[in-house]
Image (cartoon, helix red, strand yellow):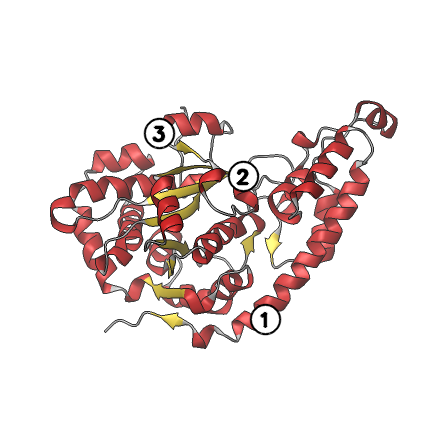
Amino acid sequence: MDKLIDPWGTELSEDYEKIIKHFGLEVFNSSIFPNANRIMRRGTVFAGRDLKIISDCIKNKKPFYALSGIMPTGEKIHFGNKMVVENLKYFQEHGAQTYILVADLEAASTRGITLEQARERAIDFHIPAYIALGLDPKKTIFYFQSENKEVMNISYEFAKKITLNEFKSIYGNADPGRIMGAVTQVGDVLYPQLKKRMPGIIPVGIDQDPHIRLARDIVSRVKSKYDFVPISSIYHKFTPSLDGSIKMSKSRPESCIELPEDTNQTCKKLKKAKTGGRDTAEEQRKKGGKPEECMIFEMFKQHLVEKDNELNRIYNDCKAGILTCGENKKRACELITKFMNDFNNKLEKAKKQVNKLSFIRFR
């Protein structure tokens, strides 16, 4: 494979099958998880590591945890970020002890954000946004990296277990900020096991797999002292940019949907989105559209249409030339406007709950 998967960048091969083979991932099978969520059922979740361990925990009601981090570098998130929350919510609803860490130290070391800025953005927006997207705040434990001395202590210990060449082979780059950010993340994903050894799962985009591989390598090297359970992970595909490129990115704001965003602006973006339509309406009625190439259909599939039978109808009507691209864009605008209004209402309510959340306090 000619490109590294880079958790700090935007480069990624389009061929997910090659990624699975090259990095030794498991193909995701939604049938092993009860009541699989929308993105699991539809193949948006496509791979993972040690998934059966987590499936068995769910089926046999054994303890496990799910953990995700917030990188508080911006004042908004984009639409693709919500899939992490959806998977975290799934595991939370199926018995996982749930942790959210605010990666303020990593933001400082790799993105130049001060700890004060990171805390302010996390409290004012990012944590409420995760709650608005469905995370149950009463069942979630929160903490800031910079306050968690246990994470910092084991991270420094873990740093002795990797070499510079090994780090470069995983990440392609080894500047000090990235090294500190990476080993601190390993401390984070293993932190819940300091109190009780149990399986844990990390829902992430595939670009974050280097962190998972590093964590699993370190687990094998500190086994005699800590006996950690190797971390499981679950990966979702990127939400593609509206212009058809593989990943939504804030570097292309005209093709990226942010949360929150003015719905008039969002609908303008949707109207310009790449579709699988034919050159003329007559040709589309005759030959049908190509939903597999359509970014509007991808939005339906990943985010906007919950019922599978409704999604299938849209797909079949598009293929048959019954639905036009204009009609699909109009429907997408209606659905995303409803979603945005609901998100904004929930966000305002969540902001009022922040001072009641369960933050770990460290002496």
Q: Earlier in the sequence, mark 1 or mark 2?
A: 2
The residue identified by callout 1 is 348
Quadrant in the picture for the C terminus? bottom left
Q: Residue furthest right?
A: 282
Q: Is residue 341 left or right of residue 222?
A: right
Q: Residue at x 30, y 47 (%)?
A: 182
Mark 3 is on which residue type? Answer: Gly
Tell me residue 347's x, y (percent): 57, 67
Q: CA distance from mark 1 to mark 2?
A: 29 Å
The relative height of residue 147 versus residue 48 in the rendered view (above or below) is below
Q: Are marks 2 and 3 in contact (CB under 8 Å)?
A: no
The residue identified by callout 3 is 24
Q: Earlier in the sequence, mark 2 or mark 3?
A: 3
The answer to which quarter of the image holds residue 286 is top right
Is residue 10 visible in this depiction of the protein? no
Q: Is residue 173 left or right of residue 227?
A: right
Tell me residue 213's x, y (percent): 30, 39
Q: Earlier in the sequence, mark 3 or mark 1?
A: 3
The relative height of residue 182 versus residue 166 in the rendered view (above or below) is below
Tell me residue 362's x, y (percent): 26, 71
Mark 1 is on which residue type? Answer: Glu
The residue identified by callout 2 is 44
Mark 2 is on which residue type? Answer: Thr
Q: Residue at x 74, y 38 (%)?
A: 314
Tell me residue 327's x, y (percent): 81, 42
Mark 2 lies on a secondary structure that is loop
